[in-house]
Image: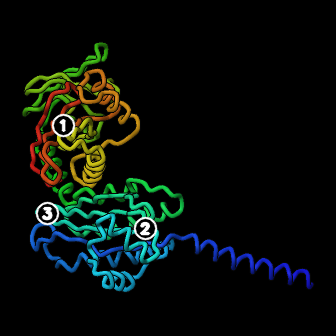
Amino acid sequence: MKKAAFGLLLAAVAFVFGTGALAAEKKRIVVGDPQTKWASGGACRGHAPSYADTIARSLRSRIIESGAFRVVSREQLKKILKEHEMAMTGLADASQAKAVGRLLQADLVMTTEVLCNPTSVEFIVQLIDVETGEFVWSKTYEMANLRKVSRALKDIAKLLAKYARTGAIGESAGKSEKMMMINSKALHDAAEVIIATIQRAVPRVRATVEEVNTYAGTVKVKLRGRGYAGLGLQVKRDDEEVGWLYLKKKGRGLLEAVTRDDISSFEEGDEASSEEFQPKVAIGFIEDEDEDDEDMVEMFRKGLLEEMSESDGLEPVDDSKVDRLLQRMGSRVRKNTLAKLFKAGVDLLIMGRFSGERGNRRIDFDVLSTVDGKKITRIKYDSRL
């Protein structure tokens, strides 16, 4: 019994000393007040310059909550700075940050800067090693406004915790950071324009099946109205759907059509209409010409697919088979790949480019039919992306 009690006592002592050692290993960090370049209008509209101090306080709190560091209090920092006649915002200077860090027996100094521009906010963070005076890490978050700054602070705390744990700090906190860097309202507005433009480009026409040649594998329809190659026609007989036909050529009158269904399902005299046609849309190659921001393009693609999935009249296509076909096709329209896309169920393909700088990008997209690769409409739009 005594041996067991002694063993428990040793374990307790080891735990106390062990946790004390772990606590001692935590680095001590100073977070300075931000430098600011504030404008009452533009991207900082609705926030007073003092909001920058709120950002710094929130950052301190998040670092404390992570438990990864011992954080020097603002009061301690102010006291040292006052005694040595230094400014809080002067910590952005590496030599001064090193001096203050040594006075506070800190290992690291984090500085922040908030720059308010007419159409965006730049939130800059830098981490300085007190011993060497070198910058360990620097990051600039560009946001449409200050509404997403709390997301940035959460990501910074996440990256710092990783640094405390591994000694390495990455450039990005992952998907959440990428989402934060894109203007969600601008994406939504652009998606609405794209969706509405495609919807307007799909005509509502009626037709009658005039000829079915099962041996040649051809169907001809008499079109009442004008359609484009790839326009889908729902074929009915006695008010029951028998399948879908897709025009092979643009025009009106007697036109040939193709099908993904069994051609023997159709008969002369069947009635057809595009009223129920909801094009299946895939997003192909999109280039950001001036900024070359691949992350923005990818987030835009995903956002547009999500917006289309919630719209009426369009159906987004987002699967691995189609993605592989699009990757192989790249920026050049290839007829053999288009044929495979059509077979895979894709009706329309969006391709194009962004031009201009961040926050003022011009969208220039073509919407192509997978039947003949020809453009059914073009989208030109000035966005805030």
**Viewer can see residue 299:** yes
Q: Which residue is located at x 51 percent, y 58 percent?
A: 167
Percent x, y of residue 325: 35, 30
Q: Which residue is located at x 23 percent, y 22 percent?
A: 219
Q: In the image, what residue type sits under mark 1?
A: Gly
| Count of marks, rendered view | 3
The residue that disc 1 covers is 352
Percent x, y of residue 338: 27, 26
Mark closest to the chain's N terminus, 3 or 2:
2
Decide: marks 3, 2 in contact (CB < 8 A)? no
Name the element at disc 1: strand
The residue that disc 2 covers is 108
Q: In the image, what residue type sits under mark 3?
A: Asn
The residue that disc 3 covers is 117
Specify the farthest residue to the front.
84
Percent x, y of residue 175: 37, 55
Cα separation, mark 1 vs mark 2, equals 46 Å
Judged by depth in the image, the label closer to the viewer, 3 or 2, is 2
Q: Nearer the viewer, residue 369 or 44?
A: 44
Decide: marks 3, 1 in contact (CB < 8 A)? no
| Image quadrant assignment for residue 317 | top left
Numbered circle sitting on residue 310: none
Specify the farthest residue to the top.
215
